[in-house]
Structures are given as structure tokens and as C-alpha cells.
């Protein structure tokens, strides 16, 4: 009897644990719907943009942050990227958005759960940003050393992801023009220098006159040579030579081939990770800076990312009151994952009346 209902009992037990043992305390669930006219120039008739978001969050705020009364799901607080939160214990974010932006449709997902204590911190994260072709899952576990306002962390991270840094074209066995044929392009032989203008690749002897008075000269053997022009699958002319095709059209075919033959199996690597988190603040000033760096990685699969660039992310939030009415701030994040660099920097001034 127990065997029949054990999964149900486990499910009910886990649900009760989450609901009644503090896991959802101080969390917020949200649902938001946005529909707006696209930002365009000219008279293009585009369908409205939209964004539908559902999620739940439990993220403690630092003293320098202002609590929101309502969440729409597009909040992007930079401090959420830091491993260490404002309090110890559970924090999490579950966010799912369906988006249409100027006729481009995609789904963006972000899920993370982290738990920290005075000596230990761990975080699971899954991100899938279709708008940036970036997807990965990671499990980060570190020891924590707190010295005043400075937190040093060191540990390891296992990260899984689709193949990055190893495009499918690297494993293509054919030559470049065979790839063009595979996608329906066709090349045609034409004379490189058609001296007799008959459209046929000929070879013949040509008399070179050296003296117009005596009509003396000599004969040379001449071959007109081969060139190619290219047509697309619909029979339209696209290039007048191999060089032109290779420069302007072949890169597009490579992108198509990489997308069509992308290996679906996920890859993984194990990385050493070190971090630094600094929080300094008083009534008139705050400074929150964190760095996560992955100086050494070991591939766990055949096509794990082998880029030479070190993976890292850096975040900074600094603000100060210059007087009773004037305050300035600068906030920014810079990250480099799998050769995909991204940054976001904001600076400004506030006048309080």
C-alpha cells in the first residue's frame, strides 16, 4: 500500500515543508501583462509588442535599496547577481517571460536559488535568454571568509551549456563550394578573359606583332582561363566570381549550417571560482562591489567550452550624497561568459527638493 502512494506522500510532504516551514516567508508571486506600440520610424505596420511574465521572488534588500510595492517581473537589480545576499538563508528568483519585440518572438527564463551562512554559500542558476542566444545552468558552492565588510569566497562550480566555441562548421568534411551546393546555390563556368567573345572557354594560339612595318612577331599559346558566377536556389544572379561569393554570401551559409547542425547534447566543465564581495555604507554613502572569476576550468565532455578568455563577472553600485539635496550614483555590471561579453553601466545625479 505504501509503495502505491509513496510518491504522493513525498510530494505532499515537500509542499508542506516549503509552505509551512518558512521557505515562502517574505516572498512575492507576480503576474504582469504588457502590450504596447512598437518603436519604429516610418510607416511600417507592425503588430504590437508584448511581454507576459510570471514569477516568484524572495530577495532580501540591502539598506541602500528601496522596497517596491509591486513587482512586474522586469526588475533588474544588479545586486541580485552577487553570490552573497543581504541576509543569510534562502533567497530565490523564478521568472518566465514571453516577449514579442518588433515582430521578433522569444522566451526569456531566469531561475536561481541560493543559500548562505556565515561560513558557506551555494547557488543554483539556470538562464535561457533566447534574445541573446545564451543558455546555461550552474551549481556554485564556496567557502566564505568574512573580515569586516570584506567577504572572500573560494570553491568550485559545475556549469552545463549547449556547445559554445565549437561551431558545427569545424566538423564539416567538404570544401566550401560543396556547402554552397548543399544549400541549393549553383555555380557556372565562364571564361576569365574571353578574347574571342564567344562565351566558351577556349585555348588557341595568338600572334603577337612586334613590328607594324615588317609585320614581324611571334605566336603564343593562350588559354582563356576559368571563372565562375553564382546563382541562388531561385536562379537569381548573386556573385560574379568565387572571391565575391566567398566574401559576401559564404558567411551567411556558415551561420545557417551552424544553426541547422547544432549539437543538442549539453556540454559541461568544472571550474575553480574565487570571489570578493565588499559592502561599505553609512547614512550618506554606499558602495557594493563584487567580483566572480573562474581562473581554471576542466572540460567534463568532449566539446566543453575551450575558449582562452577567462570567465568572470564584475558588479559595482556606488552612490553618495554631495549635499542635503544633491546625490550622485554609478552602477554597472560587466560579464564575459563563453566569449559573449555584456555590460550595462548607468550614472546619474539626483536633486531632492
Image (cartoon, helix red, strand yellow):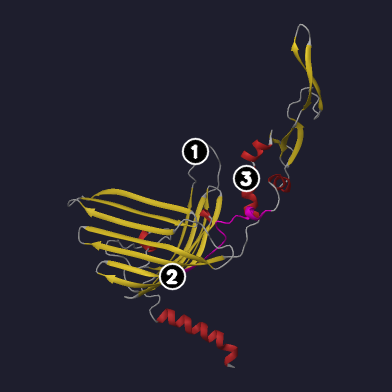
Q: Residue at x 62, y 39 (%)?
A: 247
Q: Is residue 279 above or below residue 211?
A: below
Q: Is residue 160 magenta?
A: yes
**Residue 60 position within the rendered picture, expressed as x and y whole percent measured from the top left:** 34, 68
**Residue 100 position within the rendered picture, expressed as x and y whole percent measured from the top left:** 53, 52
Q: Disc 3 or 2, which lies upstream in sequence?
A: 2
Please give left or right for residue 224 compared with residue 8 in the image: right
Which residue bears the numbered disc 2? 156
Q: Disc 2 or 1, which lies upstream in sequence?
A: 1
Q: Is residue 95 visible?
A: no
Q: Residues within 10 Å of mark 3 (few under 14, many from 20)?
A: few
Please give left or right for residue 348 compared with residue 128 in the image: left
Which residue bears the numbered disc 3? 252
Picture quadrant where residue 74 is located? bottom left
Q: Residue at x 46, y 53 (%)?
A: 341
Under circle 2, the secondary element is: strand
Q: Is residue 27 magenta?
A: no
Picture quadrant where residue 16 is located? bottom left
Q: Residue at x 76, y 36 (%)?
A: 188
Residue 41 got which mark?
Answer: 1
Query: Which sits in the foreground, 205 or 217?
Result: 217
Please give left or right for residue 121 compared with residue 255 in the image: left
Please give left or right for residue 345 compared with residue 201 in the image: left
Under circle 1, the secondary element is: loop
Q: Which residues are magenta?
A: 157-172
Amino acid at each position: 500500500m505504501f509503495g502505491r502512494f509513496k510518491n504522493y506522500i513525498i510530494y505532499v510532504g515537500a509542499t508542506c515543508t516549503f509552505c509551512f516551514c518558512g521557505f515562502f516567508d517574505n516572498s512575492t508571486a507576480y503576474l504582469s501583462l504588457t502590450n504596447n506600440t512598437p518603436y519604429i520610424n516610418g510607416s511600417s505596420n507592425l503588430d504590437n509588442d508584448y511581454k507576459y511574465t510570471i514569477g516568484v521572488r524572495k530577495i532580501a534588500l540591502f539598506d541602500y535599496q528601496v522596497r517596491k510595492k509591486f513587482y512586474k517581473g522586469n526588475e533588474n537589480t544588479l545586486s541580485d547577481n552577487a553570490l552573497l545576499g543581504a541576509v543569510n538563508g534562502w533567497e530565490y528568483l523564478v521568472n518566465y517571460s514571453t516577449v514579442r519585440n518588433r515582430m521578433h518572438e522569444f522566451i526569456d527564463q531566469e531561475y536561481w536559488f541560493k543559500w548562505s551562512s556565515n561560513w558557506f554559500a551555494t547557488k543554483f542558476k539556470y538562464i535561457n535568454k533566447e534574445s541573446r542566444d545564451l543558455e546555461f545552468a550552474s551549481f556554485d558552492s564556496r567557502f566564505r571568509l568574512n573580515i569586516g565588510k570584506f567577504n572572500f569566497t573560494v570553491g568550485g562550480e559545475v556549469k552545463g551549456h549547449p556547445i559554445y566555441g565549437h561551431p558545427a562548421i569545424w566538423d564539416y568534411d567538404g570544401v566550401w563550394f560543396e556547402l554552397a551546393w548543399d544549400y541549393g546555390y549553383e555555380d557556372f563556368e565562364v571564361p576569365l578573359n574571353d578574347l574571342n567573345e564567344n562565351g566558351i572557354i577556349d585555348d588557341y594560339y595568338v600572334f603577337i606583332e612586334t613590328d607594324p612595318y615588317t609585320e614581324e612577331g611571334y605566336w603564343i599559346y593562350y588559354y582563356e582561363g576559368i571563372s565562375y558566377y553564382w546563382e541562388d536556389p531561385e536562379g537569381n544572379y548573386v556573385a560574379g566570381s568565387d572571391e565575391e561569393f566567398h566574401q559576401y554570401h559564404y558567411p551567411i551559409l556558415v551561420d545557417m549550417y551552424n544553426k541547422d547542425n547544432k549539437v543538442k547534447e549539453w556540454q559541461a566543465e568544472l571550474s575553480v571560482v574565487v570571489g570578493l564581495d565588499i559592502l561599505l555604507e553609512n547614512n550618506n554613502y554606499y558602495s557594493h562591489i563584487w567580483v566572480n572569476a573562474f581562473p581554471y576550468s576542466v572540460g567534463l565532455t568532449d566539446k566543453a567550452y575551450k575558449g582562452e578568455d577567462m570567465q568572470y563577472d564584475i558588479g559595482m553600485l556606488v552612490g553618495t550624497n554631495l549635499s542635503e539635496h544633491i546625490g550622485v550614483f554609478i552602477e554597472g555590471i560587466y560579464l564575459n561568459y563563453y566569449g559573449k561579453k555584456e555590460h550595462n553601466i548607468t550614472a546619474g545625479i539626483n536633486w531632492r527638493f
